[in-house]
Amino acid sequence: MKKTITAYCFASGHIDFGVTLPEGAIALATGEEQTVREIITGNARLSRHDNETLFVPGVPEAENQREGITAVARFIQWLAKSNQAGFRALGV
């Protein structure tokens, strides 16, 4: 059986993965671990500081929380285009 995980982000836009959703995190997508990681990694933006940390595009650059949450919503809608067996964007 393949491991199911959730991709989530925080207000900073930092994306992480886990089997549970931490308090204060926003769920982005869920599904089979390898599929979720591949789709999220392929659509997220890399940190300019370490070129490894994943961020929701537009959130780190947002001028306020409203712009940030709008960027998260757009990202989830974009991820929904990749919905398939083993991957489902959340919140759409």
Image (tube, helix red, strand yellow):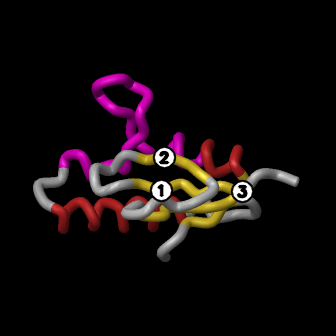
Q: Is residue 50 left or right of residue 34?
A: left
Helix, strand or loop status at disc 2: strand
Using the rendered view, name the quadrant where residue 29 is placed.
bottom right
Label 3 to label 1: alpha-carbon separation? 13 Å
> Residue lying furthest right in this view?
1
Figure check: 88 above or below 50 = below
Position in image of residue 34 (x %, y %): 70, 44
Picture residue at 58% right of the left edge, 59% below the top: 20
Disc 1 marks which residue? 8
Query: What residue is pinned by disc 3?
Result: 4
Answer whether labels 2 and 1 touch (C-beta < 8 Å).
yes
Q: Are marks 3 and 1 in contact (CB under 8 Å)?
A: no
Compared across the picture, whether 10 is left or right of 90 comes to: left
Residue that appears at 44% across and 44% down: 44
Pointers 3 and 2 in contact (CB under 8 A)? Answer: no
Which amino acid, mark 3?
A: Thr
Count neighbours of disc 3 (C-alpha within 10 A) and say few if under 14, some if 14 to 19, many if 20 or more. some
Callout 1, which amino acid? Tyr
Relative depth, front residue between 10 and 29: 10
Query: Quadrant location of residue 19?
Result: bottom right
Compare marks 2 and 1 and give the one earlier in the sequence. Answer: 1
Quarter of the image containing the N terminus?
Answer: bottom right
Residue type beneath disc 2: Asp
Magenta highlight range:
39-61
Query: Is residue 65 toward the left or the right of residue 25 in the image?
Result: left
Q: Any mark on residue 16, and which?
A: 2
Residue at the extreme top: 50
Helix, strand or loop at mark 1: strand
Q: Position of residue 68 (x, y in %)?
A: 24, 60
Residue placed at 54% from the left, 54% from the top? Answer: 7
Asked if 71 appears above or below 46 in the picture, the reply is: below
Given residues 79 and 49, the one toward you in this image is 49
